[in-house]
Amino acid sequence: MSVDERLPDPELLRTGGFRLATHLYAPGDVRGTRRQLDSLRTYAQAGDPLADDLVSLVERLPRGEGRALFERALGDGIDSLDDPPPELVTFFRHAEATPYWVDHDRLESGARAIVRTGLLGLFPLADMSLMGGYLASRATKPLVGTGALVEDMAARRLVETTTWWLDVTTPGALHTHENGYASALRVRLVHAHVRAAMNRRDDWDYDAWDRPVNQVQTVGTLLLFSLVYVVGMQLLGVRYTDRERADIHHLWRYAGWLMGVDEQLLPATEDDSWRLLWLLATSEFTPDDDSRRLAAALLATHAQVGAGRGNVGKILGRLSLRLHGSVSRIVLGKDNSDFLGLPDDPIAQGAVLAGAAVNFAGETVRRWLPGATALQEQVGRIERTQYARRLGAVFPLDRTYARHMHTAAGTPPG
């Protein structure tokens, strides 16, 4: 086969909801070539030099000093520090130098489109993005190495990921030094801590697993929050305009830049995202036993987070598990879902499809009813705020992610 000849479609995009989504939403032929795939795979050996150098500095400084400097620069800017270390200066000079292509009006528009859907957005986040991400077995190895298979840790990860997503997608939050901006940079530093910890392990298999938390995996995570989220919302009946979809992708392009994704990899448009997803589906989505174990931990977490107290709480927990599992099964398809051990519940799946039809009808009315979109944005904002409070009641939230950084480094928090 010629290096410029189109490769066959990957299995992931020929099954379940992804097959329908590809048919409905992909921009024609998005198949890549062997040359493009080989070029992408070179980024599997690349990390994030600016963040990696900063973590090296943090590890050299007395305990707590590096993090304190990072947090001060995060909140007040690098110029607020007297004689900061060069690694910190380089990192924040880059972060604070907003790229020319960033349009804050579009960031606001994209965030409002996400907020408008309220808690419905949690289903693509958990059931398509997180669950689907477990099919990429190389990307799961750092999760396994940092204890994400323990049920308590899985629940914390879901809560923290959801809270992070709420922070990043709140209107105005990606302005410099605001909550979303800070959350993106903190997670970037967490990734660098995990990368450093995995590189110190004697059992890390570079031939089989590539570099830990590499650029391919980071941009893959970005696509789960952007393209897969948008596709998931559309499959659940949400009607986004072309401009709204483009603005959501613009929001995640900037979030990805803050998180250290190489600009050569950052999708600029939805079409770019589809072509990148195709290449990732071809090369990265090969599940293994760890994928199954992570899926089981996530399902258990749905039951835990969705439950309340007493018998009613148990019923709600089981209902949450069935609904979330059914959304994942519809999207990921039978073979992937069977491999991951997802429940096969025709009644719950029918309820999900019926709900999608109701959502589509409601969305059609919203688009024609004056003032309905603004009202739905307000309702969605209230839902998200209340849900964030509920998550804080499940687990105490630490938006600095200190626990992750210390866990990666092998030291207790403090």
Image: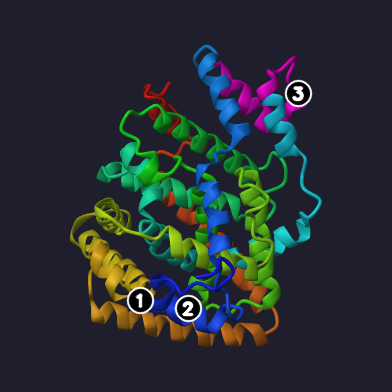
Magenta-drawn stretch contains 238: no
Cα–Cα span, label 2 and label 3 = 47 Å
The residue where tag 1 is placed is 330
Color style of the picture: rainbow
**In this rendering, does residue 340 appear at all?**
yes
Instruction: Give the main secondary structure, helix, strand or loop, of the magenta stretch.
Output: helix
Residue 170: x %, y % from top left? 62, 55
Residue 316: x %, y % from top left? 27, 64
Residue 70, compared with residue 225, is above or below; it is above
Question: What is the quadrant of residue 285 in the picture?
Answer: bottom left
The residue where tag 2 is placed is 235
Which one is nearer the viewer's eye here, 293 or 401? 293
Residue 366, compared with residue 157, is above or below; it is below
Cα–Cα span, label 3 and label 1 = 51 Å
- Highlighted magenta segment, given as a residue range: 65-87
Magenta-drawn stretch contains 75: yes
The answer to whether the residue labelled 2 contacts the one labelled 1, judged by CB atoms less than 8 Å apart, is yes
Horizontal side of residue 408 vs 111, given as left or right: left
The residue where tag 3 is placed is 80
